[in-house]
Image (cartoon, rainbow, N blue to C red):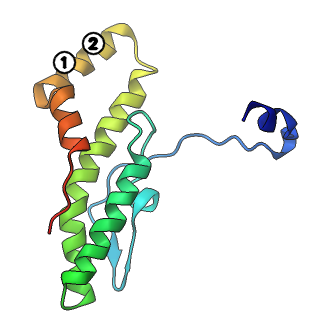
Amino acid sequence: MRSLVERTPAEQILETPIGDRLPLKSWSRGRVTLLGDAAHPMAPALGQGANSTFEDAYELALCFSQASNIQFALATYEQRRIPRTQLIQTRSALGEMRYYATDREASEQQMQEQSQMSSEEYQDWAFNYKPSC
């Protein structure tokens, strides 16, 4: 990998800022819906961006296989996925801010997070996800 990067001309290497945004309340309009980064871009602090996309794709397929129409499938997909991804997006943003926070700010932020859900609880919740069936 290192030699590949070293052989790449500098003008071909693109550097862009990390992009995220506040969670959306809806991902669908008509027969179109979003998933992955289009629905819930997040900072890489938790490393859950790609995982969330896989979960979205699985849930969306499951919803389409169980629904009688597109509108019901998309509504069910949003109900199942938005609350989970909102929590992941929020924790990811907080984790990203930790890189730029002073020691005092980081300590206050950590105390606030711990009062809501411990790291162990969060990891169990995030890594033992079971799609709705």
Q: Quadrant of the C terminus?
A: bottom left
Q: Quadrant of the N terminus?
A: top right
What residue is shown with label 1? 111
What residue is shown with label 2? 107
Q: CA distance from mark 2 to mark 1?
A: 6 Å
Residue at the far bottom in the pictured view: 68
Give the structural element (helix, strand or loop) at label 2.
helix
Q: From this view, report whether residue 109 is shown above or below residue 49.
A: above
Q: Nearer the viewer, residue 15 or 65?
A: 65
Residue at the far top in the pictured view: 103
Residue at left 14%, top 31%? 117
Residue 105 falls left or right of residue 11: left
Amino acid at dot 1? Met
How many labels sit on residues? 2
**Residue 127 location, x and y as percent?**
25, 42
**Residue 63 location, x and y as percent?**
23, 76
Amino acid at dot 2? Ser
Image-quadrant location for residue 56: bottom left
Q: Are marks 2 and 1 in contact (CB under 8 Å)?
A: yes
